[in-house]
Image: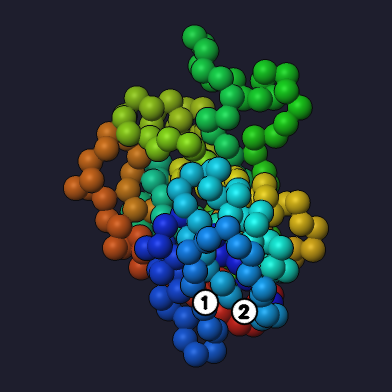
Amino acid sequence: MSVLVICAVEAERDAVARNFGPTREVSIYAHTGLAVDTPAGELHAFSVGVGPVAAAIGTAALLTGGYEMVVSAGIAGGFRGRVAIGDVVLANLATYADLGVRVEGGFLSLRDMGIDQDSSLALGDQRLVDRMAAGPATVLVGQVLTLSAMTGTDADADELATRYPHALAEAMEGFAVIAAAREHNDLRYVAEIRAISNIIGRRERSTWNIPLAFGALADAMSTLLNEPLP
């Protein structure tokens, strides 16, 4: 099965490829705007840039290569009391959390505004859930938010937690990757995987553990994508 993994930055992409052995070769790239002619059965990991615009453009261009599975992968901030640093989240719902309008009473999504366009996309193939559960990382299944701006204050973190009581993590690309992938009916699987590097709130880099998150991401991706795929 040919697999496309979309990451934001090269460090995430390299973590994705870290734990694969000779039975599952990974080709790694930085996206240059050119599609890749994908041989059947290969795994390609790309860094396409940060944020939903770069993710959507990169995914749409690369999917002309004829992939059967697309995974949005990387590290993420987690919600306090819902996840721990080093946990892995497999998304069952990807939500574009700042697509809408802020008003005096809170936040209105596009649907709230009367616009017929979804801000959430459902995921969560049970075969992938079962496979992830068999790996070494602690894996939680739940909602992952996509934001154009990361959360950097306790007030914003509390507001997001209240607005999305089931959200486990926030990142900046998942919804965009999934929305672009949904335009291709020949895909067998679409997934978002996030390893938790920090708890969202006041931006205190000293409390983050990015190496731990990269290790968890490497474990999770090798568990998910080692052959044979389901």
* Relative to 214, residue 53 above or below: above
Which residue does the numbered mark 1 point to in the structure image?
A: 27
Asked if the residue under mark 1 is in contact with the one under mark 2, i.e. CB atoms within 8 Å, the reply is yes
- Which of the 4 image quadrants contains residue 116? top right
Residue visible at 52% across and 13% down in the picture: 103
Between residues 127 and 34, which one lies in front from this camera angle? 34
Query: Mark 2: which secondary structure?
Result: loop
User: Hey, what amino acid is under mark 2?
Assistant: Glu
User: Hey, what amino acid is under mark 1?
Assistant: Ser
The percent position of residue 154, horizontal first and vertical second, equals 31, 29
Q: Residue furthest bottom?
A: 22
Q: Quadrant of the C terminus?
A: bottom right
Q: Which class describes the residues within 10 Å of circle 1: few (<14), some (14-19), or many (20+)?
A: few
The percent position of residue 58, horizontal first and vertical second, equals 58, 54
Coloration of the structure image:
rainbow
Q: Is residue 188 left or right of residue 119?
A: right
For residue 7, say whether it is visible.
Answer: no
Between residues 117 and 92, which one lies in front from this camera angle? 117
